[in-house]
Amino acid sequence: KVKTEKELQIVTNSTNSLVGTKVVVARVGAVLPSGMDITFSKVMGVPSEGMLCGGETLGKEKTDGVLLVEGNPGEEYIL
């Protein structure tokens, strides 16, 4: 779950996104560098309100799983 102005539920198959880790999130309405639009979806019947992003998804170097963020990045990193 992602805490923003409301808590978001995002379904992922990532193996490195543990509870309490900070990751890069593309919320519904975001457009990735590839041009992919992030939309509301259901994964195996479970609502998903965004996508956890790996480096390659963001046009950066490939990461093993989602991109982990250190420290307190702030609002400027919200997609």
Image (spheres, rainbow, N blue to C red):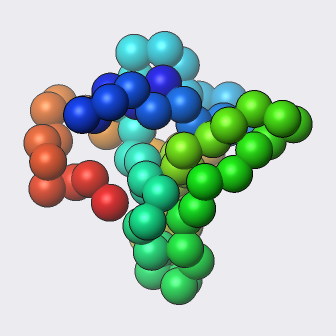
- Between residue 2 and residue 65, name the one nearer to us: 2
Residue that protrudes farthest toward the top in the picture = 19
Point 68% across, 37% down: residue? 47
Give the percent coordinates (x, y) of residue 37.
55, 74
Give the percent coordinates (x, y) of residue 49.
54, 44
| Residue 7 drawn above or below residue 39 | above
Residue that protrudes farthest toward the bottom in the picture = 35
- Between residue 15 and residue 74, name the one nearer to us: 74
Count of labels shown? Answer: 0
Point 49% across, 14% down: residue? 19
| Residue 34 drawn above or below residue 29 | below
| Residue 23 drawn above or below residue 31 | above
| Res. 71 in view | yes
Give the percent coordinates (x, y) of residue 15.
68, 29
Left of 2 or right of it: where is 48? Answer: right
- Between residue 73 and residue 49, name the one nearer to us: 49
Residue that protrudes farthest toward the right in the picture = 44
On-image quarter of the C terminus: bottom left
Give the percent coordinates (x, y) of residue 25.
42, 48
| Residue 64 drawn above or below residue 58 | above
Left of 11 or right of it: where is 78? Answer: left
Indicate the quadrant where residue 56 lies: bottom right
- Between residue 69 and residue 31, name the one nearer to us: 31
Point 60% across, 54% down: residue? 40
| Res. 62 in view | no
Point 53% across, 19% down: residue? 18
